[in-house]
Amino acid sequence: MAADKTTRSETFPSGIASVGLGEVEREVPLDDPPPLPPNAGLAVIGKSVPRQNGRAKVTGATRFTVDVTLPGMLHGRILRSSLPHARVRALDLSAVARHPGIRAVLPVARPEDPVAALVRYIGAPVAAVAAVSQSAAEEAMRLIHVDYERLPFVADMDKAREPAAPLVHDAASAPQGSASGFPAPRGLPLNGNVRGPASDSRGDAAKGFAEADIVVEGEYRTQVQMHCCSEPHAIVADWRADGVTVYMSTQFTAGVRHELAETFGLKLSRVRVIVDGMGGGFGSKSTLGAYGRIAVALSRQAQAPVRLVLDREEEQMDSGNRPGTWQRLRIGARRDGSLTAISLLSYGTAGVALGAGVGNMAQALYACPNFTGAQHDVFINAGPGCAMRAPGNVPGAWGLEQAIDELAERLAIDPLVLRDRIDPSAVRREERRIGAERIGWQKRHAPGADPGPVKRGLGVAQSLWAANVQTNSACEVRVMRDGSVEVLSSVQDIGTGIGTVMAQTVAEVLGLRPEDIALRIGDTEYPAGSPSYGSRTTASITPAARVAAWRVLQSLLREAALALNAAPGDLIARDGRILVRDEPGRSMGFGEAAARLRTDRISAVAARGDDYGGFRRRMEDAALAQQDLGGVQFAEAAVDTETGIVRVERVVAVQDCGRPMNPLQIESQVHGGVVMGLSYALFEERILDQHTGRMVNPNLEQYKLAGAGETPAIEVVLLENYQGQSATDAYGMAEPATISTAPAIANAVYNAIGVRLRSLPMTPAAILAALGKIPARS
Amino acid sequence: MNRFAWAHARGIAEAAAAASTTVADAMAAPPGAGGDEMSIVKAGGIDLIDLLKENLLVPAKLVSLKDIPGLDGVVEEQGGGLRIGAMTTLATLADHSVLRRRCPVLADALRGSASAQIRNVATLGGNLLQRPRCWYFRAADYRCLRKGGGHCFALSGENQYHAIFDNGQCAIVHPSTAATVLVALGAAVELANAEGAQRQVLLEDFFVPPHRDVQRENDLKPHEILTAILLPQLPEGLRMAHVKQGERDSFDWPLADVAVAFDLDPEGSCKRAAIILGAAAPVPHRARTAEAALRGRRIDEDTARQAGRAALDGAMPLAKNAYKLPLFEVLVRRAILAAAARQ
């Protein structure tokens, strides 16, 4: 039977490097490379390698989608609803069609269709044009006449839950399911504007609360946060007789290709999607989107390339957002801190869409035998939400991690000690230990202890995020006869530098330097790569890159073996040479070996295999790894109790992502996550005028993002957490980096002033109100 | 943004002749009225371009003041005052050696305004004439009272950044931080018309509160150019301070800002005091009760605290801006104590 064996047994390093490494046995496919040693034993992987496109970015050479110009390119523009809820009775496009600069006109709202005649939020697309210039496209907006029948609307989640509230959807138009679960459960009841509950339970919560010595209960609110990508949503669609090519700022070229094929009835072979530079996405550029479909339809109609770039107001009104939430958490515990029950009730609103749950923090972060949860989506007449960096768990952490701190105080147990008792994760235990030492937790004092109006405090919060993997993720590695090397995949660089990590991976295998590896990514002409969402890119593409590089190396070694008169299995690639393992004197240059190839190039394509120890769960092209990602952040905040101003002075972020592939880039990503979390904590909020349903701050002036002046000292510590799960054993960082920042700051604010802020953002007005300093209105 | 013609004026009279309307008049005109001939002057253009991009202002022509000689720079005048050309940029003033020596409070306030990129382009004249940042005023969808409509949307709407004084009709706050300081220092503006006639108006009187005219923030007339800001000679030993608090330190409008200036008699009692609140009212707000609370008193923690409380006299917060009361109270106190601590 041995001949049938497709795997071999290998011994992998296992455990947390700073705690002590052990070993784990894994079965690996026969043609997978040998286990990768810990980072300390590697030449390129695990080193802080500067990103390959860094210079191009800072010198302006990088081509973003907005920079793409094609011959004969037209400019698209979307006319958007100026009313929060209306029926389009008539849409008169005759005047615009006569405009000499207009090449295509597309109705989006359709008066004749009872469903498509309705617009449900300000900013909803009504019609679109493609014109010879941007100014002609803008002029066209004034030539389109829309006859609206105003309908009652609701722009507030609490009001939308009232029985007499205007209905945003009817049963036919209401989106199915809910994202308050993964995958989204379907068939949930619709009651007025409320979809749900999505229920979840284990054990017997009532019994658990009865057994509790102490119960904490609190209500927590989070605001709507906008994605605010530095690069707007942008597409250049080029429809030709033989297929469509789309240049798009997208987090998933391969996925957009599928959507285009399906939407426009094309074979995959006739669809190409390309992205070069990208200025962020944070979840809002995961799909083709309405604007993408519009641009392609305009291009098809005009028979010319069409460029469509959303302006900042469109970005803020209609490119997605992080939904706002309300949650009530109850936690029961015994005197020793052990949890007896948790109950969670949540309502959230993603505007006209779904996906406003609070994630799985309360369910899964701490050991607790009894849990009951009910999460609801509430529809309001506002722009749709969409996935945004750690959807669900960001608002979830805001509630849970404050509630745990409150519990610790009621039990008179240090918040870290309590977490040591109830958090089963060895990774977070080590992260707490390291972080406490770095931030100086022992100097933490009782609330309000500082003399003077400015009070300082320390806070901590934890995160939980699934380690996602895209199994439909592949990569090609080519070696040319001149010794040059290319790595190719449709995977896109959202801005985090995945290409550089792929180059490191390939360079490590081939014994080259990362800069020796040419990157060909962001184009569906190459093997389909992973999406850049769900913190899965590194986990999905680097094992494929290493396996492909390993396989192509074996071909090269066969050529070199002939020249060196050695067995291919005795050869290794190191420092730009191919050498005999036990006789390093017998060697040849990598280029010399390549020169012996029979053809101009050799190549290998590899896909992401299953995790060696198996996945916890599989969903079509995606899977969850056995072990979740952790992360613990500490914040030091100063609160001016007279002005209400909170300034975060320091954040220590201790994070894990399996094997850190490139600490420099991961640290950058953590910096971004912390700043985003801080900005969420203190500044950001979509503000809707309740009388008109319009966002009053659809810009970057009155929609406030943290700037350089608000950025604290950020210290990042990365754990090396080896699990022997893949050819690189690497997982993601994007989302864990932002989950715990806001509650860590809130806990620091509480430690500073002794008042708990349960609503976001923590503005001066909110702080002064919490301190009882705002006089009642007379 | 619509197409518009573009011209460079070579002299003040030429510019004034071309300036057929003010931004305020243009924006309050009924839609379509006079748009074909409407000609507006442009200084740095920071506020103007914003208004154009939002289609709030649709002029036929813009007339640039940039080529007019002598409209920028700082001159020490014979009487001891300073004459600041209206076209001098905020960045130039923030670092200007004369201004830094003579009036560091103003230089610092300008350095703390906007962002470095904006300060490099924005002029002091334009800063004083800029239109309010009220989000209803700035959105074309709202034809509000100040734009010739019939309703202030802020009064019953989202008014967290709005006025706590004089907000009965329209609740904008004046956007200029420089104005807060300049009014406290008794500055005047110099205006010239197409005939070459000049007038000087105390800046405080140049600003127009809603009860005088709800569609403008100042008394600039059509065919009139703001040419200079005149800072009087400041009395020897004048104590000054300006404190400003935004939600953010980087590039943000203040939630509240306070300028104080007072001088003391030989016994250390306050002779005269000016206490001006910015981001508090449709025009820079003189806190008269607070000024009175300082007069004749020694400046100490206690007096400052009383003046802080007195500064709220007459405040009528809206539904979402009552937090500004404690904020102004503490900033007035802090500004007074900061001024007293300066020699």
Image: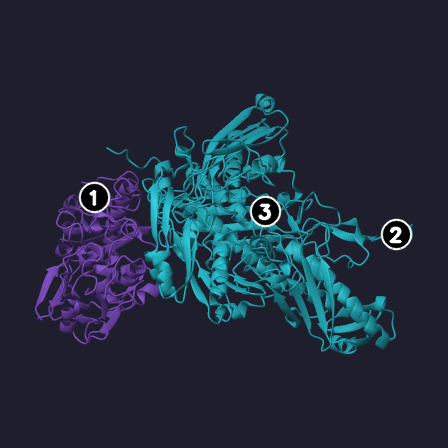
Chain colours: A cyan, B purple
Label 1 crowd bin: few (<14), some (14–19), many (20+), radius 10 Å? many
Question: Given the image, on which type of amino acid does mark 2 rest?
Answer: Asp
State the quadrant of the N terminus of chain B.
bottom left
Closest to the camera, between mark 2 and mark 3, is 2
| Among the two numbered marks 2 and 3 on one chain, the one whose residue lies closer to the N terminus | 2
- The disc placed on residue B167 is 1
Residue A28 rendering spot, x and y as whole percentages: 79, 53
Viewer-side residue, B285 vs B135: B135
State the quadrant of the C terminus of chain B.
bottom left
Do callouts 1 and 2 mark residues in contact (Cβ within 8 Å)? no
Label 2 crowd bin: few (<14), some (14–19), many (20+), radius 10 Å? few
Name which quarter of the figure residue B202 lies in.
bottom left
Task: Let me know if residue B186 appears in the view.
Answer: yes
Relative to A184, say whether B231 is above or below.
Answer: below
Give the CA separation, mark 1 to mark 2.
84 Å
Residue A60 rendering spot, x and y as whole percentages: 48, 70
Residue annotated with mark 3: A631
Do callouts 1 and 3 mark residues in contact (Cβ within 8 Å)? no
Residue A682 rendering spot, x and y as whole percentages: 42, 46
Give the CA separation, mark 1 to mark 3.
48 Å
Residue annotated with mark 2: A4
Label 3 crowd bin: few (<14), some (14–19), many (20+), radius 10 Å? many
**Same chain, labels 2 and 3:** yes
Give the CA separation, mark 2 to mark 3.
42 Å
Question: Given the image, on which type of amino acid does mark 3 rest?
Answer: Gly
Residue displayed at 76% across by 69% down: A573
**Same chain, labels 1 and 3:** no
Viewer-side residue, A705 vs B96: A705
Question: Given the image, on which type of amino acid does mark 1 rest?
Answer: Asn
Badge 1 element: loop
